[in-house]
Amino acid sequence: MNSLTVRMARHSARHPWRAVVGWLVFVALCLVVGGAVGTNSAKTADYRVGEAGRAEAMAAEGHLERLSTEQVLISARSGALDDQADKQAAEAAARDLTARMKPLPEVAEVAAPLWSGDGRILMVEVSLKGEERDAKDKVDALVAQTEAVQKAHPRLLLEETGSPSISKGVDQQRSDDLALSEAITLPVTLITLLVVFGSVVMAAVPLLLALSSIAAAIGLAMVASHFSPDAGVGTNVILMIGLAVGVDYTLFYLKREREERARGGGRLSTEALVELAAATSGRAVVVSGLAVVASTATLYLASDVIFSSLATGTIVVVLVAVASSVTALPALLVVLGKRAERRARRRAERGKPARRARGEAGGRTGDRAGGRIWAALLRPAARHPLATLCVSVLALLALVLPLAGLNITEMSRDTHSREIPAMQVYDRLNEAFPEQRVTHDIVVRADASRTRQVTGALRKLAELAHRDPLFADGSRIRTSADHRVSVLRLKVPYLGNSDQAKTSLAHLRHDYLPATVGRVEGAEYGVSGDVARYADYPAHQNSKLPLVIGALLLVTFAMTVYAFRSVMLGLIGVVLNLLSAAAALGLLVLVFQNTWAEGLLDFHSTGSIGSRVPLFLFVILFGLSMDYQVFVVSRIREAVLAGVPTRQAVLDGIRSSASVVTSAAVVMTTVFVSFVFLHIIEMKQIGFVLAAAVLLDAFVVRIMILPAALLLLGEATWWPSRPSQPSRPSQPGREAAAEPGRAPHGHPAVDVR
């Protein structure tokens, strides 16, 4: 019992207040340093993938990149701008608005006012300077001018929308949603822990450690963003994963310490109990955390800034949660244990009978009741392992079937919640100005000597598009100062997620461009724009999918073999994780690609799954499944090392770990379900599938499939190694006195390699 985990726990146990203060200083230091260096947010260039990304890079090279725009709609407060006086008032407001917008340092250009086809609305379009990703931070200056013009023309209605306004509205909605999620999650988590421990103090420990780990991780993530840019999702994933694993890791440790305390019957000191918990559950926490980190790191292979940001947030918060569980937690346990011992001594001095802590007192009765429940649940696997295995696997495979119809699309601007005011104005803009709905940017780069040929080819392309009913009209051809880059913008009168918009992109890429620009020798070309981005991103992701999944399977296998010295357990772990993740994703397809659950979960089905959801969830689910796999199999292997036959070890190990796995699953499910209440459709999908996966893994895979498989394998479970023979125990009193970290006679020997 001299592993790094035990040595760290021993040091914390011997110097508890030093360890607690050290942890608090570490958390504060992370926040201070993170605040000092700030967050390095991803730039527009970091998001470029596929042909659209290459086209955007070429346009940026010629300083012809697309600028972010805001549209201000001017209409009558009631009815229409029918008479000439009303239209003159609208035009006067447009002139006032233009005069106010042009001098703003954020504004690059203000276009001439444009009337809608029915003459009911006048639109003023304002282009913003600088990075597309930074445009939302400049919206307030424009909104202030729009509001000023509104006050000067009270008979009219001025409304503003645009990508920056919508992005700002989405950020605000996400912030409000996360506040709601926290308001739901924290009380439910606390209540769950109260039920588990029966003590407010003990229930508060996991929650406080998890929250402090989240705080430290947020600070460290700011530092990490200077090596891997933050795509704006890092904090979201830190909150979601941090609370789930932070509470779980602490729960695993706490439950084992209390179990050993009850088993020891007062013969072991608090320090010895902490060391024993560190050697068993502490080791499982470390292995589990490293498995989550290793599996999540495969997301970097996707070569995508969003996945990299998700991976960084997850890795940082998991490592911090592991650190808290092997440093601060042992110290807190010693402090609380000493406090309980002093209270017991005072009661003894007053002649009163010793009173067990509520968690311990309820442990015996609760354990007997819980043991009967879990014995009943395990009975099918124990008596009929083959039948249980077949039925359970077939049930999960039935959930996998909908995955065959998986439709992955990029969640476009059109899928955002209409509770965002800018989205409501956006809908009115699309209705009044259909030609403004979608634009394609055709970008061509060639030698300056071929400028005339490129211009002629683009004009011919514009003529072909003009005869195509899928296109509205085109803009003038813009050419860079060095005559190497040219851009033609074509408009499409359909929404970006419509079949017509997608077909128009296909016509450009596969028909019109090869027939025109493609014939200019040495010319590079591509199509960018929202539709191109929405098409290229899933395609890029699908091309990386085999690499990421292959690496994920390899990492999971290697981590399991390393943890348990068993190739067979490695194979079982990979298969079970694959099965549970696929079943959860199949359930996601069944719910979100159809309309039957729209009212129940408050969403509008797009008939698809967000392009980032499956890969991210597949990786995260593999990591979270390792939590339960490591913890449950550790208890089984621990019993085998103590000389218990494999069959009995399987049943005893799963039965003894069932309550903590169930408690952990409830906590995780609560955290993830709270994300279903969010408005952003991708976050809803992530929250739903994570909750479903945790429940499937905890109650089907670990209670039905895993024990059935291990019982059928028997001693072959540990192939190619053979568990070592248990060490010969010493006398209880002498053992406890000489080596406080060891268990008394009757405790299983612990392998901590």
Image (cartoon, helix red, strand yellow):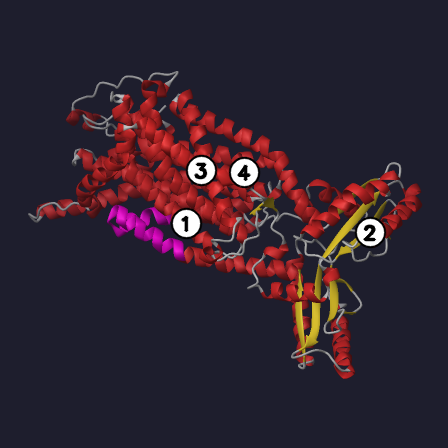
What residue is disc 3 on?
398
Residue 560 lies left or right of residue 231; in this view the side is left
Q: Nearer the viewer, residue 658 or 146?
A: 658
Give the percent coordinates (x, y) of residue 410.
62, 47
Q: Is residue 634 magenta?
A: no
Disc 1 to disc 4, how far (Cα)? 29 Å
Q: Are marks 3 and 2 in contact (CB under 8 Å)?
A: no
Q: Is residue 186 magenta?
A: yes
Disc 1 to disc 2, how far (Cα)? 50 Å
Q: Mark 1 vs mark 3: which is more N-terminal?
A: 3
Q: In the image, which is nearer the foreground, mark 1 or mark 4? A: 4
Q: Mark 3 vs mark 4: which is more N-terminal?
A: 3
Amino acid at pointer 2: Ala
What residue is disc 2 on?
465
Q: Mark 1 vs mark 2: which is more N-terminal?
A: 2
Amino acid at pointer 3: Ala
Amino acid at pointer 4: Ala
What residue is disc 1 on?
671
